[in-house]
Image: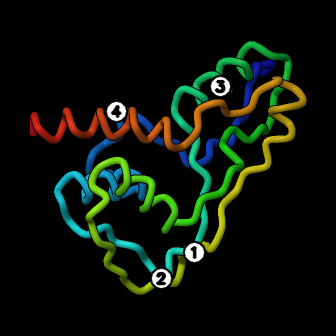
Amino acid sequence: HKVDIKVVRIFNTYGPRMQIDDGRVVSNFIVQALNESDITIYGDGSQSRSFCYVDDLIEGLILLMNSEQTGPINIGNPEQFTMRELANLVRNQINPDLDFSTQPLPQDDPLQRQPSIELAKKHLNWEPQVALSQGLRQTIAYFQENLQKG
């Protein structure tokens, strides 16, 4: 049918306008901390994830759309953080006195998720620019404003 297509694999993305109750780890940790609840960590918190700020993701998508590349190309942040590190970052930005609670690690929870963005670097000259701590500040501010409205 001679249709131009682009294929992108989107990895963990976070930022303002996330659904407060979407069940993702970033929103869960932020909401728990803003509600002054213990932050729930599954297992020992050593499982790792990468987190791409929404502005970086959108820039990557636009670059792909405007390129000759068809993909698939991974768009995400390859920098890894353990769940305990993420919980500490959120806690330290909201209330350093909060405690953690632990729950058993679900059987299907992978120990690591990390995109390879080599194709995005090579073909799109793209890589994420927003550090997790910076993106969390903006995401937390959004959640604070929207929790107060709710």
Q: Which of 44 and 105 is in front in this view?
A: 44
Residue bearing the label numbered 1: 46
Give how far apart the Cα atoms at labels 1 and 3 are.
30 Å
Give the structural element (helix, strand or loop) at label 2. loop
Q: Is residue 22 above or below residue 129?
A: below
Percent across and percent down for residue 2 are 81, 18
Asked whether, in this view, residue 83 is left or right of residue 104, the answer is right
Give the structural element (helix, strand or loop) at label 1. loop
Give how far apart the Cα atoms at labels 4 and 3 are.
18 Å
| x 17%, y 56%: residue | 35
Mark 2 neighbour density, 10 Å: few (under 14) some (14–19) many (20 or more): some
Q: Do the residues labelled 4 and 3 touch (CB within 8 Å)?
A: no
Q: Are marks 1 and 2 in contact (CB under 8 Å)?
A: yes
Percent across and percent down for residue 14 are 47, 41
Residue bearing the label numbered 4: 17
Percent across and percent down for residue 79 are 68, 50
